[in-house]
Image: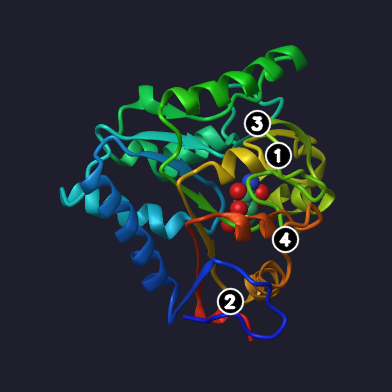
């Protein structure tokens, strides 16, 4: 555990450093398992990307071993690309199915992923419906988050406001670059996405921000040194009442 050292903002964010990524992932899986035991109908906010993969793998294992069940749980994903068809394998929807949803006992009718297909007015409607659906489900109990290279959370790119809600955003050039390999080249990466807003994320009752590996160290340091700055959207997590930053030793601030 690290506490506020020089270069860190005053925060209630709990920073937890684990010796290895695997131990950090187990700790996050433990929190989710405990939540589901206490509240089988829990609403989980889920993320894509390399960061949460190990947590999903551990939860899949526990589900197969009947140590945890998602049968009554509800999922809301953070974001989705715009302009891809429903059968496109590069959607986050497809990614979630392959990496988690199809491998646990969740009822797919309670799996929500924003819909980035359709024209501008369909997407705007979808954004509003998404906010409403989260509200109807009783709000998100626990939201998983990774940090993008430019400090984004979900697809809340630099410039995103504290009070932003689910909406269509233009992707930052670095974000598109980071997605290029999955799309067979930068030219094929969508230019826009639909994402929960910063306020949508902060409404979750708990946040678990994860960062693993040497490449994330600088992002972790910047997140700890910045507060409520739209130029670094991850900095908004300091304002949350129950947020954990879970990092492996190689991503820990120096
Ligand atoms: C994507 C997702 C984010 C994720 C980020 C980091 O852009 N929209 O939710 O946190 O990338 O990805 P990774 O975990 O692969 O580093």
* Neighbours of disc 1 within 10 Å: few (<14), some (14-19), many (20+): few
Label 2 – label 4 distance at C-alpha: 13 Å
The quarter of the picture where residue 100 lies is top left
Mark closest to the chain's N terminus, 2 or 4: 4
* Neighbours of disc 2 within 10 Å: few (<14), some (14-19), many (20+): many
Residue furthest to the left in view is 66
Q: Is mark 4 within 8 Å of ligand 1?
A: yes
Q: Nearer the viewer, residue 115 or 202?
A: 202
Q: Which mark is residue 149?
A: 4
Give how far across and how far down residue 146 sits, in percent. 58, 56
Mark closest to the chain's N terminus, 1 or 2: 1
Give how far across and how far down residue 115 sits, in percent. 60, 24
Determine whether 179 is above or below 115 in the image: below
Label 3 – label 1 distance at C-alpha: 10 Å
Q: Is mark 1 within 8 Å of ligand 1?
A: no
Q: Nearer the viewer, mark 4 or mark 3?
A: 3
Q: Nearer the viewer, mark 1 or mark 2?
A: 1
Residue pictured at 62% horizontal, 81% vertical: 253
* Discs 1, 4 touching: Cβ within 8 Å: no
Give how far across and how far down residue 224 sits, in percent. 66, 71
Mark closest to the chain's N terminus, 2 or 3: 3
Q: Nearer the viewer, mark 1 or mark 4?
A: 1
Q: Which mark is residue 251?
A: 2
Q: Is residue 134 left or right of residue 42?
A: right
Label 1 – label 4 distance at C-alpha: 22 Å
Determine whether 207 is above or below 121 in the image: below
Name the residue carrying label 3. Answer: 166
Label 1 – label 2 distance at C-alpha: 29 Å
Indicate how the structure is coloured in the image: rainbow
Determine whether 246 is above or below 122 in the image: below
Mark closest to the chain's N terminus, 1 or 4: 4
Label 3: which secondary element: loop
């Amino acid at each position: 555990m690290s506490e506020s050292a020089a270069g860190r903002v005053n925060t209630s964010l709990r920073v937890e450093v684990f010796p290895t990524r695997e131990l950090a992932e187990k700790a996050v899986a433990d929190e989710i398992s405990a939540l589901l035991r206490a509240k089988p109908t829990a609403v989980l906010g889920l993320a894509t990307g390399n960061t949460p993969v190990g947590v999903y793998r551990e939860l899949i294992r526990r589900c197969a071993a009947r140590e945890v069940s998602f049968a009554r749980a509800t999922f809301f994903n953070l974001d989705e690309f715009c302009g891809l068809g429903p059968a496109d394998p590069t959607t986050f929807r497809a990614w979630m199915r392959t990496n988690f949803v199809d491998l646990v006992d969740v009822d797919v009718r309670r799996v929500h992923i924003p819909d980035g297909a359709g024209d501008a007015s369909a997407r705007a409607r979808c954004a509003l419906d998404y906010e409403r659906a989260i509200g109807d489900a009783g709000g998100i109990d626990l939201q998983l988050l990774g940090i993008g290279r430019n400090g984004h959370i979900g697809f809340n790119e630099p410039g995103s406001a504290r009070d932003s809600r689910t909406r269509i955003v233009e992707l930052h050039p670095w974000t598109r670059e980071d997605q290029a390999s999955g799309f067979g080249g930068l030219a094929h990466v969508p230019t826009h996405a639909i994402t929960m807003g910063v306020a949508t994320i902060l409404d979750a009752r708990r946040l678990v921000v994860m960062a693993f590996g040497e490449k994330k160290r600088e992002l972790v340091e910047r997140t700890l040194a910045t507060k409520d700055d739209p130029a670094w959207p991850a900095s908004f997590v300091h304002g949350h009442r129950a947020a954990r930053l879970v990092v492996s030793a190689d991503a820990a601030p120096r």
